[in-house]
């Protein structure tokens, strides 16, 4: 008899306990549904919606359900949307956008663990079918909301436009359009470091067709910041990925020139010449060979300049000056007969110098140094007639 009574009591207690647990779970699921109910325009009570969804997301029975976090994201998105027009609603949450994205991430993580995708699809798909019609996916919805805000600021308030873009590029998959926008707004807002970071990310997107320009933009931002380490890093990254793009190579060479590492700079500029020879690059190589005291190499590259542009004054003058110095060095300290081997070298170099000096004068006859050079060369050759002619021209120019 006693055992029967005890069994009945325990059975009743178990039933009551089971009912209580079920009711609690139902209550919390009800909190999720109530939160969704309170964000509908016709029944809007945003404080109540926040209260209910926070209650559900911290309760043991509902905190690990994807639906809870999906509805939480919807609540924050709705508050953001309404808050753009209603300051009281905006004041309810300090950062609804980040809260929405983090809630979506949590919902997707929970579904991934359970091998379901109901709410993942409702988040990621641009649109999906519900019992009442088509509904915009949450990621697409909040992206549209944010881009609408960007439009308000894009022409004048660049920093605000930049700040609105941050969540889009932070939480959503890489999108070249959005990376282009945020790097542009950052640059216009003089946020050069951020502009460089997003330009580099844009350049890293494989399918993007403007990678070279993106890396160039990143490099330029670092250059303006005087961040030589990142400036060189981006240039080297660009050169490795786009070995035929001379922009990266010439700027890398410039870094080495400024550091007076001429051998390294010459090595890099020779690669540029292989891709696209220009008078400027060839001249720079020649000048560096002069700095490295390799005059014959310098002559070789000045002559390459003239192969590209026979009217290049700087290269022509440099060759005239080279042979002038050769002649002067041979002559110095020697009182040689005109037929001696030493004087023969002097005359040969003087003749070469005269050829280039005359050519330089045809290109630009307004350089006093040329007249003085030619006078000295004629003196070396003992050509008194031309010495007097040069003296007269020099006098006439004074």
Image (cartoon, rainbow, N blue to C red):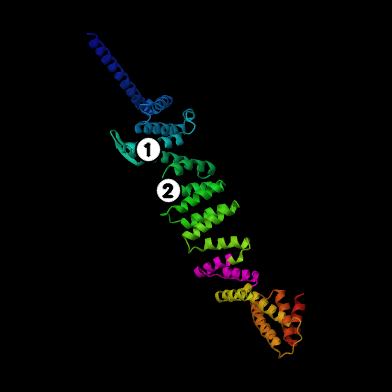
Residue 127: x percent and y percent? 33, 40
Residue 365 position by quadrant = bottom right
Residue 93: x percent and y percent? 47, 30
Classify residue 21 as left or right of residue 158: left
Q: Is residue 24 above or below residue 260?
A: above
Classify residue 382 as left or right of residue 21: right
Q: CA distance from mark 1 to mark 2?
A: 22 Å
> Which quadrant does the C terminus fall into?
bottom right
Magenta segment range? 264-293
Residue 11: x percent and y percent? 26, 15
Q: Which residue is mark 2?
A: 175
Q: Is residue 324 above or below residue 78?
A: below
Task: Sort mark 2 into few (<14), some (14-19) or many (20+) by Cα contacts within 10 Å.
Answer: few
Residue 292 highlighted magenta (yes or no): yes
* Tag shown at residue 167: none
The mark closer to the camera, 1 or 2, is 1
Query: For numbered disc 1, what is the local secondary structure?
Result: helix
Residue 80: x percent and y percent? 44, 33
> Which quadrant does the N terminus fall into?
top left
Please count the marks in the image: 2
Query: For numbered disc 2, what is the local secondary structure?
Result: loop
Q: Which residue is mark 1?
A: 109
Label 1 or label 2, whichever comes before in sequence order = 1
Proximity of marks 1 and 2: CB atoms separated by less than 8 Å? no
Q: Is residue 307 above or below residue 122?
A: below
Residue 311 appears in the figure? no
Task: Sort mark 1 into few (<14), some (14-19) or many (20+) by Cα contacts within 10 Å.
Answer: some
Residue 88 appears in the figure? yes
């Amino acid at each position: 008899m006693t055992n029967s009574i005890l069994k009945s009591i325990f059975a009743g207690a178990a039933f009551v306990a089971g009912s209580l647990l079920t009711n609690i779970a139902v209550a919390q699921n009800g909190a999720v549904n109530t939160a969704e109910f309170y964000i509908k325009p016709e029944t809007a009570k945003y404080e109540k919606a926040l209260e209910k969804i926070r209650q559900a997301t911290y309760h043991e029975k509902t905190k690990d359900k994807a639906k809870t976090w999906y509805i939480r994201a919807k609540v924050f998105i709705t508050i953001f949307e309404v808050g753009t027009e209603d300051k009281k609603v905006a004041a309810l949450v300090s950062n609804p956008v980040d809260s929405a994205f983090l809630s979506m991430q949590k919902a997707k993580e929970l579904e991934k663990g359970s091998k379901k995708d109901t709410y993942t699809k409702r988040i990621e798909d641009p649109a999906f079918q519900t019992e009442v019609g088509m509904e915009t996916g949450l990621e697409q919805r909040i992206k549209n909301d944010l881009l609408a805000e960007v439009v308000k600021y894009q022409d004048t308030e660049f920093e605000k436009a930049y700040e609105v873009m941050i969540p889009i590029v932070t939480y959503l998959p890489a999108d070249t359009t959005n990376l282009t926008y945020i790097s542009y707004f950052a640059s216009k807002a003089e946020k050069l470091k951020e502009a460089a970071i997003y330009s580099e990310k844009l350049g890293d997107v494989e399918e993007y067709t403007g990678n070279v320009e993106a890396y160039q933009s990143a490099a330029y931002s670092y250059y303006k910041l005087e961040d030589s380490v990142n400036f060189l890093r981006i240039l080297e990254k660009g050169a490795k990925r786009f070995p035929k793009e001379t922009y990266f190579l010439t700027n890398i060479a410039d870094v080495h020139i400024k550091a007076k590492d001429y051998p390294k700079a010459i090595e890099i500029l020779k690669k540029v010449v292989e891709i696209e020879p220009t008078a400027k690059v060839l001249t720079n190589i020649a000048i560096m060979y002069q700095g490295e005291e390799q005059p014959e190499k310098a002559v070789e590259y000045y002559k390459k300049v003239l192969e590209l542009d026979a009217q290049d004054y700087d290269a022509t003058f440099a060759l005239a000056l080279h042979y002038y110095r050769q002649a002067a060095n041979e002559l110095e300290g020697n009182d040689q007969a005109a037929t001696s081997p030493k004087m023969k070298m002097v005359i040969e170099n003087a003749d070469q110098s005269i050829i280039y000096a005359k050519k330089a004068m045809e290109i630009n006859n307004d350089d006093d140094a040329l007249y003085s050079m030619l006078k000295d060369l004629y003196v070396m050759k003992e050509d008194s007639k031309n010495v007097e002619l040069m003296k007269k021209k020099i006098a006439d120019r004074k």
